[in-house]
Amino acid sequence: MAGTDWYKAAPCAGRDDLDWFDLDCGLQQTLTICHSCDYQDNCLAIAVRYRYYEGVWGGLYGKQLIAMVDQHRGHDAEQN
């Protein structure tokens, strides 16, 4: 799917019942949805590209997400 069209088909689309940014609110249910999603890589790529450190992105959150974003930030600096 082109651009961000994949988001419309992702199992998280329209899931207003879950809070993707408050990790104390339904984290396990949120992660279950992420881990079964065919678009995990697309989602994580958004977090890396825009340097999102908060919330659940592509099944990662907290220190794991921060490490992934920072790792790619270093690659961006090397390419420039």
Image (cartoon, rainbow, N blue to C red):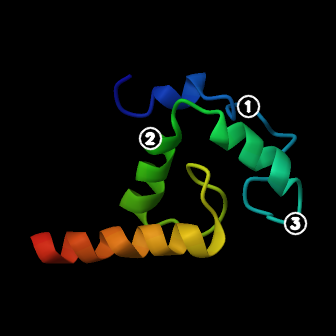
Residue 53 can be seen in this image: no
Relative to the observer, which residue lies in front, 32 or 10?
Answer: 32
Q: Which residue is mark 1?
A: 14
> Residue 80: x and y, percent?
10, 73
Q: Amino acid at mark 1?
A: Gly
Q: Is residue 53 left or right of residue 56?
A: left
- Identified at 23% across, 71% down, the residue is 75
Q: Residues within 10 Å of mark 1 (few under 14, many from 20)?
A: few
Please tell me whether mark 3 sits on a helix, a strand or a loop.
Answer: loop
Could you tell me how far apart the alpha carbons at marks 1 and 3 are, in whole angstroms? 20 Å
Q: Nearer the viewer, mark 1 or mark 2?
A: 2
Q: Nearer the viewer, mark 1 or mark 3?
A: 3
Q: Which residue is mark 3?
A: 24
Asked if 48 appears above or below 46 in the picture, the reply is below
The mark that comes first in sequence, 1 or 3, is: 1
> Residue 64: x and y, percent?
56, 69
Q: Which residue is mark 2?
A: 42
